Amino acid sequence: MSRKKSTVKGSYRRSTPVIRLRRNVDKIVRHAALCKDRLDIWKASTNSEVEGAIKSVEAILELVKRLAGHVDRLVSSGFVPPRRIPAWQPAKGDRVRVVDDHRLKYEEAFASVLKSDPEMLDDLVVVETLSSGEVSVQRGRKMPFLVRKSHLSRRAEAA
């Protein structure tokens, strides 16, 4: 005997990002209420941290109530969040530089090269973007090397 697909699977419900956010807020309320209930039972203890925790969870519940109000107003206004800006994808021939946050690692690795070419990490050209997320870069005609995409930024073109 064959069952209809709708009886086998639950109905799939699509919702807007704002409605999904509202569901997340509801979960926070439920979790905070559970914490408060548990802490209320622990009030019988003489530990002063329990009272501090109760005050904290009550503050959380108050903040979440305000958050729920904001989200409800977003829902009722029909708010639609803006589309995400796609992440930068380096393309072959792009001029890039190693970002300051990760520079030390590359300065250590290429110390001898940087002595003769101090601008090496600031003027690189993308040779290829690999499926692993790494980027093969090259300075002039020197040997290409791999850099993580997150370690690179576009180089501002000289005016």
Image (cartoon, rainbow, N blue to C red):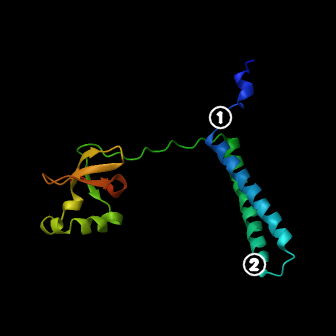
Q: Secondary structure at mark 1?
A: loop
Q: Residues within 10 Å of mark 2 (few under 14, many from 20)?
A: few
Crowd tier of the residue under label 1, counting other residues whose Cα lies within 10 Å: few below 14, some 14–19, many 20 or above: few
Residue at position x 71%, y 47% in the image: 72
| Residue 75 makes an appearance in the image | yes
Task: Say the numbered circle drawn on residue 125.
Answer: none
Q: CA distance from mark 1 to mark 2?
A: 43 Å
What percent of the width, then of the height, locates residue 34? 79, 60
Q: Is residue 22 left or right of residue 48?
A: left
What residue does disc 2 label?
49
Q: Residue furthest right?
A: 44
Between label 1 and label 2, give the one nearer the viewer.
2
Residue, x 21% and y 65% (percent of image)? 110
What is the x, y in percent for residue 131? 35, 43
**Element assignment for label 2:** helix
Residue tagged 1: 14
Residue type at mark 1 is Arg
Q: Residue 51: percent from the left, percent from the top?
A: 79, 76
**Whole-percent x, y for residue 46 in the image:** 83, 82
**What residue sits 31% from the left and 46% below the top?**
90
100 up-or-down from 146: above or below: below
